Structure formats: C-alpha cells, structure tokens
Image (cartoon, rainbow, N blue to C red):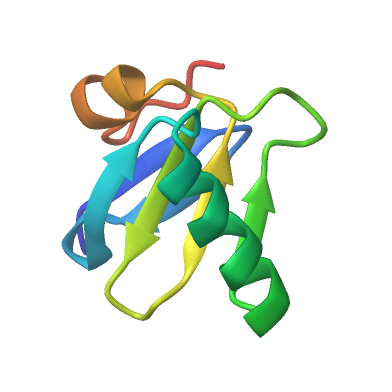
Amino acid sequence: MEDVINIGYSCYVLRGRIIAVVEPSSSPIKRLIQDSRDKGTLIDATYGKKTKSVIVTDSDHVILSARSPEYILNNGAGDDGE
C-alpha cells in the first residue's frame, strides 16, 4: 500500500501526488480555488467546516481540508485521530 496522508474526516491523499499544502488566505490561492472550481477539479473534503489548508496535486486537482497544513504534513500519515 502506498503512503497516504489523513487530511481529516477519514479522507486520505497519496503522499506522492501532493505538490503543495498551503493556507487559503492569500489572493493567489483564492484564485486557484475558484479556477479549480470552474474547471471541475476542486475536491472539498472539509465536511462543512472552515477551510484551513489547500492541497495541490500533480493531477491538477485542488483539495480543501479542515486540517491545518502543519497537521497534514506532520501528523497526518496514517493517523485516523479526528
């Protein structure tokens, strides 16, 4: 099994597919989210919670997570603790 990262609420992303994990607060990231939404490549894994991180993958998908970038990069590997 490939190495996966828990991005919260039992949602996982393959570690090797991630290009960047960033906070959603800057204008360029907000534009990236909107462009991805328009193209149909946005995946919202927040379950209605506030977006704390934006994950960009090598397949041009953008994933929204309610977990912080620090949690995703440091604690998310295989951890199912919500």
**In the rendering, at what x and y percent does residue 70 appear?**
28, 19
**In the rendering, at what x and y percent does residue 23 appear?**
41, 30
Which residue appears at 49% of the width and 41% of the height?
27
Which residue appears at 68% of the width and 36% of the height?
46
In which quadrant is the C terminus drawn?
A: top right
Q: Is residue 1 visible?
A: no
**In the rendering, at what x and y percent does residue 64 appear?**
57, 45
Q: Quadrant of residue 56?
A: bottom left
Check the image and report above or below for 57 versus 76. below
- Side of 44 relative to 47 (left or right): left
Residue placed most toward the observer, 71 or 82: 71
Residue placed most toward the observer, 81 or 54: 54
- Side of 35 relative to 13 (left or right): right
Q: Quadrant of residue 72?
A: top left
Q: Is residue 51 visible?
A: yes
Residue placed most toward the observer, 34 or 54: 34
Which residue appears at 58% of the width and 70% of the height?
36
> Residue lying furthest front in this view?
27
In which quadrant is the N terminus drawn?
A: bottom left
Which residue appears at 39% of the width and 49% of the height?
55
